[in-house]
Amino acid sequence: MILIMGWGGDHTAWAFQTAAFAAEFDVIALDNRGVGQSDVVDRPFTIPDMADDVAHLMDGLGVPAAHICGASMGGMIAQELALRHPRHVTTLRLHCTTSGIDSYGRLLIGSFLRVKARGDVDEFVRFSLPWLLTRKTFAERPDFIEFWIQRALDYPYKTGLVGLTRQAEAIAGHDTRGRLASLHVPTLITTGIEDILVPPSASEELHALIAGSELKRIPDAGHMHFIEQASAFNEACLEFLHKHCA
């Protein structure tokens, strides 16, 4: 299984998934270019380029095919991987992601980058979290919120402005709408019902575009529903995998 994280995130954001999935699968969680322990590339690149990175990694590790899982930008990469390298994809899981970015999304990304450019890590983390998690979680799980704030502040491989900006440029160019009908791979799409960053309508559009896909809506969850409601998310993924690995 290959886990591909979203904009600015690295493999550690799958903290609530790796052990659950590793009980049944060999799990590879990677850092996309520009974040974590991968190189920061200060030149333009695209979502297809990052999909090719994943294919090259699989080839280098001798993994001919895998269950591909992508969240947010990682879901964009997963779409391109399935389109460009279909032989590498056994099943496809697309979480809190979209087939293309609209003007609202581009404006929002610009707002994130402007806050990031101020250089105050604490401010950026506290600005970001309300876009990623629900009001209910903030109200009822303050220790959970504080855990993620401190984790971000203490993490030694923080994403810099260059890596975040280059990934944002790639996201802005993402558009798979006209090609997804060509996919013929078992696909699970999940969304947090209260996602305000990539709304459920984006997942519903993916579901309509990918023939035979399954759509799972996770209640009491925002964009990072795989963290906020990890048990429900993991259960949905494993149920899907059991169905298609039998």
Image: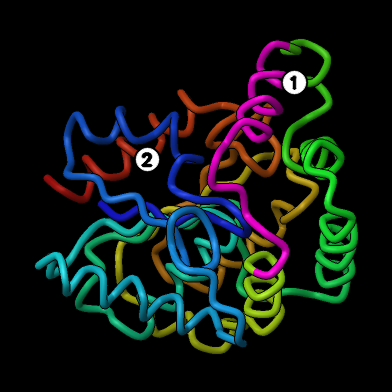
Task: Give the total of numbered labels.
Answer: 2
Membership of 15 in magenta stretch? no
For label 1, the residue is 137
Label 1 Cα neighbours within 10 Å, binned few <14 / some 14-19 / many ≥20:
some
- Residue 114 in the figure: left or right of residue 162: right
Front residue of this view, candidates 88 and 8: 8
Asked which secondary structure carries label 1, the reply is helix
Q: Position of residue 72 (x, y in %)?
A: 59, 57
Kind of residue at badge 1: Thr
The magenta span reads: 143-162
Q: x, y percentage for residue 93?
A: 41, 55
> Dividing the picture into quarters, in which one does residue 118 lie?
bottom right
Residue at the location (39% across, 34% down)? 17
Residue appearing at x 72%, y 21% in the figure: 145
Alpha carbon distance from label 2 to label 1? 22 Å
> Would you identify the image quadrant in which residue 203 lies?
bottom right
Relative vertical location of residue 214 with respect to residue 114 in this rendering, above or below: above
Mark 2 packing: few (<14 Cα in 10 Å), some, or many (20+)?
many
Most prominent secondary structure in the magenta stretch?
Answer: helix
Image point (56%, 85%), residue name: 45
Left or right: residue 89 versus residue 11 is: left
Q: Nearer the viewer, residue 117 or 30?
A: 117
**Residue 127 versus residue 182: which sits nearer the camera?**
127
The picture places residue 232, in percent across and down from the top left corner, at 48, 27
Q: Which mark is residue 237?
A: 2
Q: Earlier in the sequence, mark 2 or mark 1?
A: 1
